[in-house]
Image (cartoon, rainbow, N blue to C red):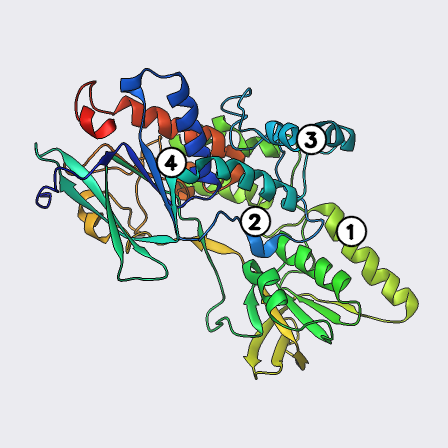
Amino acid sequence: MSPSPAPVDATPVHDLVGIGFGPSNLALAVAVREHNETAAPHERLTPVFVERQRAFGWHRGMLIEGATMQVSFLKDLATMRNPVSRHSFLSYLQDKGRLVDFINHKEFFPTREEFHDYLSWAAAGFDDQVSYGEEVVRVGLTADADGTPLFEVVSQDVSDPGRTTSRLARNVVVAVGLTPYLPDGVTESKRIWHSGNLLHELDRHETGRARRFVVVGAGQSAAEIAEYLHRSHPGAELCAVFSRYGYSPSDDSPYANRIFDPEAVDVYYEADDALKRRLMGYHRNTNYAVADLDLIEELYRRAYQEKVRGEERLRILNVSRVVRAEDLGDQVTVTVEHLPSGSTERFEADAVVYATGYRPTDLRGLLSGLESAYEWDADGRPLLDRDYRMRGVASVPGGLFLQGGTEHTHGITSSLLSLAAVRAGEILDSVLAGRPAPGRDAAANR
C-alpha cells in the first residue's frame, strides 16, 4: 500500500493520537503522564486526544440517583497499574475531603454519580491534551519528508462540519465506545428512548403527570430504570417487559469474577475459537442480561407489597415481547405479545424505554482508507495482537490500537472499566517499545 504524498514539514507529529476521551483513553492519558514525569526528555511521549462531546462525560443519561457501580473503586483509572498513583479514586477522595467519610461508609461500590465525578476530576487535569467538540471522520496513511509512514487523523468540528483538522501520528488509539442497540424496526422518537438517554429525555419532557411507562429488557440497566421510574413517578404504572421468565442475578462470586482478572485476557487470547465460545457462554452471566440480586429482590418486594395493598403499579410482563410501539405524538401505543399463548395486550404509555444494550462500534467507516492495510476475520472484525494492536499486512506506522470492540479476541473485559488501567499500561508499553530511536524526529517532539 503506497502512502499518500508527504505532509507539510511544519505539521507536528504526535507520538500518539487518541480517538475518543472516555474512561479508556483517560486511563491511557494518565499512564502516559506518569511515564513522562519520570522519563528522560528524549523518552517522553507527545499525546493528544480528540473527543466528540463538548466536555467530558460518561453515560450521563444513566446517572440515576442511588445507582451504584458494578466494579470495585479499586478498578479505577490507575490503581491496578500503579497503586500509588495520584490519579486514583482514593486520591480523588482525599482531594475532595471525603476519604475518611468513604472509609466509614464501608462500601466497595460507590454510586455511579460519585464515580462520574471522579472521572471528571481526573479528566480536568488533561484539558490541555484534549480537543473537545471534534469528531474524527477518517484515519489514513501519509508519510514524513523521509518517507516514514505516519497516520493522518482527520476530524471535523461538531458545530461546523466544514471546519476540519488534520493531525499526524506515529500511533493511534481508538476508544470510541459502544453504539446503542435498538431492535429491528425501532427508532428513537419523542416518546421512544434508548436507556442511555433516559435522564436527558426525562428532563426534556414533562413526565410529572405520566400515567404509564414501559421498560423493555431484563438486564441491569432495565432493572435500574424500572426501579427508578417506579420510585420517582408514584402516580404512574411501570410495565417491565422481557422475554425471559424473570430477572436473572449476575454472578459476582469470587471465582467467577476471575474472568475480569488481567490473567484471564491471556487465557482467552490464546484459546482457539471453539474454546473462546465456550468460555463466553460459561461466563456471560457475569455481565450480560443480568442484574444485581439486591435490586431484583427490591423490585419483587415492591410488587408483592402492592399485591398486599390490592394495587399493581409495578407490572412484570414476563415471557413477553413488545410487538409494536407507535409514537402518536402525545402518547405511545404499545402492543405486547405473551409468547407462550400468542395473546396480545394493547395499551397506551407516556414513554417506552428500550434497555436493550449496546453493540461494538463498526470501525470500517472510520478506517475505510486503511482496510487493506490490516487483517480482518470472516465476520469483518479486526484481528489484533495481544497488545490490542491491529494486525497489519503492509508497511504501516507504529501501531493502531483498539480499546473496545476486541471481545472476540481479548474476552469479556474488552470495553469494561475492570481492566482500563492495566490495558492502558499494556498499550503504553507497546508504544514505547516501537517508538523511534533517540534523536529521530527530535524537532517534532520539542
Q: Secondary structure at mark 2?
A: loop
Closer to the eye: label 4 or 1: 1
Q: Position of residue 218 (x, y in %)?
A: 63, 58
Frontmost residue, 206 versus 76: 206
Disc 1 packing (10 Å; few <14; some 14–19; many ≥20): few
Reading the image, the residue beneath label 1 is: 297
Q: Is residue 231 left or right of residue 394?
A: right
Q: Earlier in the sequence, mark 4 or mark 3?
A: 3
Proximity of marks 4 and 1: CB atoms separated by less than 8 Å: no
Compared to 78, does 413 lie above or below? Answer: below
Q: In this view of the protein, can residue 331 be seen by the observer? A: yes
Q: Is residue 156 left or right of residue 253?
A: left
Reading the image, the residue beneath label 3 is: 97
Reading the image, the residue beneath label 2 is: 288
Question: Label 3 vs label 2: CA separation?
Answer: 36 Å
Closer to the eye: label 4 or 3: 3
Quarter of the picture containing the C terminus is top left
Compared to 317, does 264 lie above or below? Answer: above
Q: Secondary structure at mark 4?
A: loop
Q: Position of residue 243 (x, y in %)?
A: 62, 64
Disc 2 packing (10 Å; few <14; some 14–19; many ≥20): some
- Dot 2 amino acid type: Tyr
Q: In this view of the protein, can residue 413 be seen by the observer? A: no
Question: Label 4 vs label 2: CA separation?
Answer: 22 Å
Question: Label 4 vs label 3: CA separation?
Answer: 49 Å
Disc 4 packing (10 Å; few <14; some 14–19; many ≥20): few
